[in-house]
Every structure is written in C-alpha cells, then in structure tokens.
Amino acid sequence: MLRRACPAQHFRLTRSLSRTSMWLARRALRRAMPAASEKEVLLAFIAHWYGQGLAEGVRRYLDRREEGCLTS
C-alpha cells in the first residue's frame, strides 16, 4: 500500500501510523499508571520515546511554568 502511494499519500499514511502508535503508547501508560496525573503520564511517555534527559528538561520547564516563571 505504501509502495504504490504518491508522496502526499505516503506522508499522510506515515503520519497517521505514527499518531496511532503514539496514542496507543499513551493509552497503555495511562492504563499502567491509573493514579498518575496527566503530567506524570506525559513525562513517562516522553522518557520512553525520547529519553529520560528530555523528560527531565520538560519536567523542569513545566514546573517553572506552573510557578509562573518562564524566564529562568
């Protein structure tokens, strides 16, 4: 199916598959972490897909944003 697709179709199908796999991963994390906040699920997702270092950076950013301090 992907081989016969034109470039625009190929892109749409690839993007759709990526979105679906990411949605399924977040749903699995939500089920595995029923007591976790959305923030905790998001950070677990980021750690799994992109690494713990990025997840820690996002956590620090979100914490600063919640405190109302985005400049530091």
Image (spheres, rainbow, N blue to C red):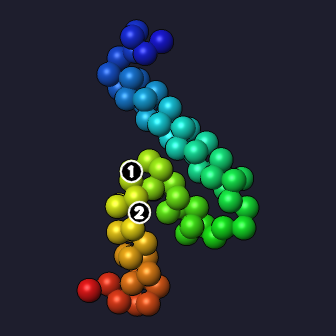
Image coords of residue 61 (percent x, y): 37, 76
In the image, taking residue 47 as reference, residue 38 lies left or right, namely right
Quarter of the view holding residue 54: bottom left
Residue beneath disc 1: 50
In the image, taking residue 69 as reference, residue 20 lies left or right, namely right
Q: Which residue is drawn at 39% across and 53% down?
A: 51
Q: Which residue is drawn at 52% across and 44% down?
A: 22
**Of marks 2 and 1, which one's residue comes earlier in the chain?**
1
Residue beneath disc 2: 55
Q: Give me the C-alpha separation between circle 2 and circle 1.
A: 8 Å
30 or 13, which is in the foreground?
A: 30
Q: In this view, does 61 lie above or below 36?
A: below
Q: Label 2 amino acid?
A: Ala
Q: Quadrant of the image for the C terminus? A: bottom left
Q: Is residue 67 above or below residue 36?
A: below
Kindly give the residue lying farthest to the left in the view shown.
72
Task: Check if mark 2's residue and mark 1's residue have beta carbons within 8 Å.
Answer: yes
Image coords of residue 1 (percent x, y): 48, 12
